[in-house]
Amino acid sequence: MLDVAGTIVEASTGTHAFLAGIKVDLSITAGAANTTDVYGIRVSSITAQSGTTNATGLSVAAPTGASNNYAINVTTGDIFKAGTAYTNPDYVLEQWATGQIVKHAEKIGASEYRGLQILGSVEEYCRVNHALPLIDAVRSLGDVGLFNGGDAVLASLEEAYLYLFDHERRIASLEAELAFLRTRVN
């Protein structure tokens, strides 16, 4: 194992095509057929100056040849964003249940959330824009990663359940009315 710690600072003048803290052109091959774990690289911090085109914390090519090939494999713990555990948006359900968003007000999308829309208008939006409204709203902010995009998907799923709850209530009401009318006819 190679353990390296330090700081690399690019010269402030000139044009540079490539700057790497550590560039590893490395092919890791497990020597034995029963090798349990093969690991790559950990990057703790990267800071790019303005004008930098791309800054990547870690770029991993997809591995091949093993029984299970993982480009990224989280073996214990969870995925964290800025040192904070990822949590569901929940503001959709809070707004539905309480009429306001207080507990989850700090979550991305909560301040813009307008509440459950009429399903017909959502259908029309999807027909025109080929996207669900909440997902499209997040995409309009620019590049969207796993966490913010995932929040939009989960918020849309929460809305889908709210529509299902409403349909269940309406179906139950119609079934009760039908049963009542049947007793009147017979």
Image (spheres, rainbow, N blue to C red):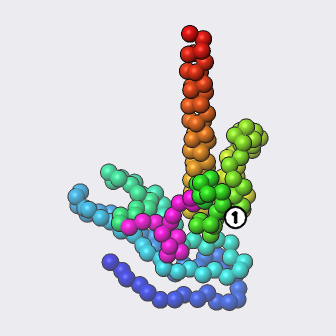
Residue 76 rendering spot, x and y as whole percentages: 35, 66
Residue type, mark 1 in image: Ser
- Judging from the image, what secondary structure is the residue with disc 1 in? loop
Question: Could you say which is closer to the camera, residue 42 or residue 155?
Answer: 155
Q: Is residue 23 left or right of residue 119?
A: left
Does the stretch in magenta take in 82? yes
Quarter of the figure with the C terminus? top right
Q: Is residue 41 left or right of residue 110?
A: left
x then y, percent, for residue 160: 59, 44
Q: Main secondary structure of the magenta part?
A: loop
Q: Which residue is mark 1?
A: 111
Residue 176, above or below 55: above
Q: Residues within 10 Å of mark 1 (few under 14, many from 20)?
A: few
Would residue 99 be found to the left or right of residue 27 on screen? right
Which residues make up the magenta segment?
77-90
Asked if one can make out residue 143 in the rendered structure from this viewpoint, the answer is no
Identified at 63% across, 80% down, the residue is 48
Q: Residue furthest top?
A: 186
Q: Is residue 17 above or below residue 152?
A: below
The N terminus, quarter of image = bottom left
Q: How many marks?
A: 1
Q: Which image quarter: residue 138? A: bottom right
Note whether 69 is above or below 43 in the view shown. above
